[in-house]
Amino acid sequence: MGSDHKHGTQNTSAAALTKALLLTGSFLIIEVVGALLTGSLALLSDAAHMMTDVAGLAIALVGIKIGARPADSRRTFGYQRFEILAATLNAVLLIAVAGYILYEGVKRFFEPAAIQALPMLAIATAGLIVNLIAMRWLSHGKSESLNVKGAYLEVWSDMLGSLGVIIAAAVIWLTGWTWVDAIVAIAIGLWVLPRTWTLLKETTNVLLEGVPDGLDVNAIAIALKQTSGVQDIHDLHVWAITSSVPSLSAHLVLHDYADPEAARIAARQMLSKRFKIDHVTLQTETTDCRDGRIEHGLH
């Protein structure tokens, strides 16, 4: 059941990513041409974000496709970690684009340019609609996958950018204040950076095999020690192969009277029920192996 659910989630996410990729990729061409014709840096910044959307969606889709490959003799854990690599690349790309927009925005104050407000407004409005549609398609998968979450965040940030461009276009049209264009472009960059940094921290934590968010190692250790037949534990490790797939390994030191198989089963059931950890490797010992006297079993 767990495997079927996982594959079902992957198929749903892949379908959503494919539709979003086709939609945003088609509109990207229109927005780039429109930015060049109108002279709007804010619209160009929105186009740059949409370019990272397209790249991010493509990377995310490839990540899911490759991540679904089964384990083999060279990749015994399979290719699920590729999803995290793809999400990390997404975050790095978005940070780079945000930095470029900030640079260009400051530069525009010293080198103002003529801007055609009405075409800028029309293109930004169409971009907003495109982003809202793509966000809806991706919203269901973002809680299941950091990869999809990264793609969703990019589209979400681009949606905010489209709103900013619409406001800037309206202000320029009504007042002629072209400097608003640069301010909106800078605001978009500043808005995107902290959220992208959060995603990068999450993916880096997975790559460093850190403890997944929402899991408390101390609470897990206490729960394992309270398992029937367990006297002590050591070498407890909790990490994630990819998003939403936590793993655990530990050594359980058992009481002399304890049945090793029963203790392992009880520990596995507790970990699954209380902490939603199903990928578990437990080594049982009647004497702590750190003392140099090893009597153990694996499961």
Image (cartoon, grey):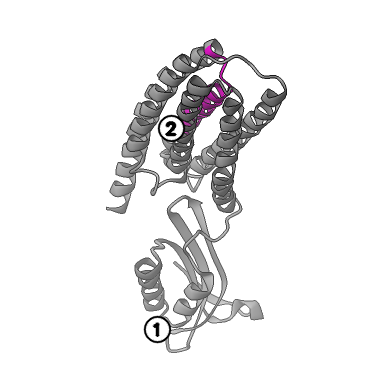
Decide which of 144, 69 is in the foreground and name it. Answer: 144
- Dot 1: element: loop
Quarter of the rendering containing residue 90: top right
Q: Residue at x 62, y 29 (%)?
A: 101
Q: Residues within 10 Å of mark 2 (few under 14, many from 20)?
A: many
Instruction: Return the x and y of residue 178 as percentages of the image width and height.
Output: 59, 22
Decide which of 118, 230 is in the foreground and name it. Answer: 118
Quarter of the image that includes the C terminus: bottom left
Residue 108 covered by magenta stretch: no
Decide which of 221, 284 is in the foreground and name it. Answer: 221
Bounds of the magenta span? 38-62
Q: Which mark is residue 202?
A: none
One can see residue 88 in this view: no
Say which residue label 2 marks.
61
Decide which of 74, 29 is in the foreground and name it. Answer: 29
Q: Residue at x 37, y 70 (%)?
A: 274
The total number of labels drawn is: 2
Instruction: Return the x and y of residue 39 as percentages of the image width and height.
Output: 57, 15
Say which residue label 1 marks.
228
Q: Earlier in the sequence, mark 1 or mark 2?
A: 2
- Dot 2: element: helix
Instruction: Return the x and y of residue 77 as percentages of the image width and height.
Output: 49, 48
Foreground mark, 1 or 2, reads 2
Q: CA distance from mark 1 to mark 2?
A: 45 Å
